[in-house]
């Protein structure tokens, strides 16, 4: 498999005419045999969902497959390792677990388009679809990262990035109403102390079972290819070495629509969580009494990682409340996430 093309250009879509011209020049880097008439007929579909980046679907006459262009969100490099994301994508695409990166530019990339329908909370709650997802995640987590030093030697995502994300949160918000919301709730909280508290519990009570995790397993990042009846994952920008339990916990938290009042048990109840983990563990050849014992341990560990997941995405939302151009209640989402963290952490021994 050929390495992606690297172009030293920073892309902006602020000016449509300049943006179109720059995209055409990038397409010509990928498909050098295209004529001017073919590249000039490029179709750029409007940005799709997402709370951080600007994503476009590219259609070009003379090219059979669509492509995806992503411009990284403003200031996201402050809390994201874009170099490792690029490494992970190239690594995973070689084993057909991620779309192939065709071209990398300074603040984004162009990759192959993944066909398939975006899943919904209702669809992933279906037993058959849950089974497909459990099998796919087990396949991802079975990669022997000890043979890949670029992954194995890294710190686990959840432990490393809680502190890193916290350090990116604004000292003061530029919008008065957001600052007032922040002060009203977080003014009485010691959120930095929360990091050491939950990290200590993870290191003391949870087994170090590491894998290359996706770490952003929200429902919209799962596609179902109906032709081949298979699951595909997209948006690997948070991919990193992590606890397997953390990635599965993150899946449960991401199985509902992202909102400041989400019910995190709406899609998977406690019983539904156990059934999903059972299907996941069966891919590791657990069965019978051994399976039930392993399940019991997982069900004690998962709430700890769910609490940590709420906390890290709380910090992410506090950052986005200042920097994101998206019309989303990030500060309300951060408050909701921290409340969910407190609820789980206070009841972790029950």
Image (cartoon, helix red, strand yellow):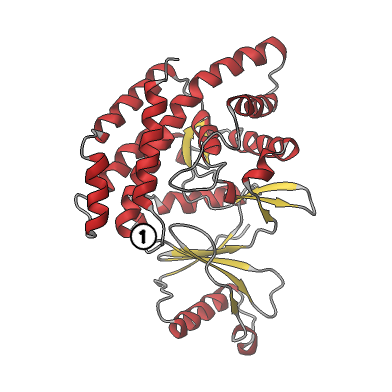
Q: Which secondary structure, mark 1?
A: loop
In this view of the protein, which residue sits in the foreground, 157 or 45? 45
Bin the neighbour count of mark 1 within 10 Å (Cα to Cα): few under 14, some 14-19, many 20 and up: some
Q: Position of residue 258 (x, y in %)?
A: 49, 48
Residue 172 in the image: above or below residue 274: below
Write down the residue under mark 1.
Answer: 324
Asked if residue 283 is positioned above or below residue 41 in the image, the reply reads above
Q: Which of the 4 quarters of the picture holds residue 274?
A: top right
Q: Residue at x 58, y 15 (%)?
A: 296
Residue lying furthest right = 227
In percent of width and height, residue 61 lies at 68, 80
Quadrant location of residue 72?
Answer: bottom left
**Rendered location of residue 192, percent (x, y):** 25, 34
Labels in figure, total: 1
Answer yes or no: is residue 154 visible: no
Q: Position of residue 218 (x, y in %)?
A: 54, 45
Q: Nearer the viewer, residue 30 or 234?
A: 234
The residue nearer to you, when weighing 15 against 108, is 15
206 shown above or below 228:
above
- Which residue is rendered at x = 21% and y = 35% of the image? 188
Looking at the image, which residue is at 24% across and 60% down? 175
Q: Is residue 321 left or right of residue 285?
A: left
- The residue nearer to you, when weighing 44 against 118, is 118
């Amino acid at each position: 498999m050929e390495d992606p093309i690297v172009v030293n250009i920073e892309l902006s879509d602020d000016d449509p005419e300049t943006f179109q011209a720059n995209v055409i020049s990038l397409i010509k880097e990928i498909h050098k045999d295209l004529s001017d008439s073919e590249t000039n007929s490029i179709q750029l579909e409007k940005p799709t969902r997402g709370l951080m980046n600007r994503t476009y679907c590219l259609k070009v006459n003379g090219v059979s497959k669509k492509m995806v262009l992503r411009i990284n969100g403003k200031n996201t490099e402050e809390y994201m390792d874009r170099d490792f994301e690029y490494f992970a994508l190239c690594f995973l695409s070689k084993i057909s677990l991620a779309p192939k990166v065709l071209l990398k530019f300074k603040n984004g990339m162009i990759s192959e388009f993944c066909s398939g329908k975006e899943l919904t909370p209702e669809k992933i709650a279906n037993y058959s679809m849950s089974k497909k997802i459990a099998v796919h995640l087990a396949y991802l987590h079975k990669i022997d990262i000890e043979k890949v030093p670029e992954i194995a030697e890294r710190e686990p995502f959840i432990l490393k990035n809680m502190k890193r994300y916290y350090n990116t949160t604004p000292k003061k918000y530029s919008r008065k109403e957001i600052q007032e919301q922040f002060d009203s709730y977080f003014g009485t909280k010691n959120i930095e102390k929360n990091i050491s508290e939950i990290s200590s519990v993870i290191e003391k009570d949870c087994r170090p079972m590491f894998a290359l995790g996706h770490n952003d397993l929200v429902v919209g990042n799962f596609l179902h290819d109906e032709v081949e009846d298979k699951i595909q994952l997209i948006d690997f920008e948070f991919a990193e070495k992590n606890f397997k339990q953390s990635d599965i916990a993150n899946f449960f938290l991401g199985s509902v629509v992202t909102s400041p009042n989400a019910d995190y048990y709406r899609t998977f109840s406690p019983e539904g969580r156990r059934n999903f983990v059972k299907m996941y563990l069966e891919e590791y050849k657990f069965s019978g009494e051994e399976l039930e014992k392993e399940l019991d341990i997982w069900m004690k560990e998962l709430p700890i990682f769910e609490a940590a997941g709420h906390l890290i995405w709380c910090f992410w939302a506090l950052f986005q409340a200042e920097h994101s151009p998206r019309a989303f209640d990030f500060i309300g989402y951060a408050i909701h996430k921290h409340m969910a963290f407190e609820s789980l952490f206070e009841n972790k021994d029950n």
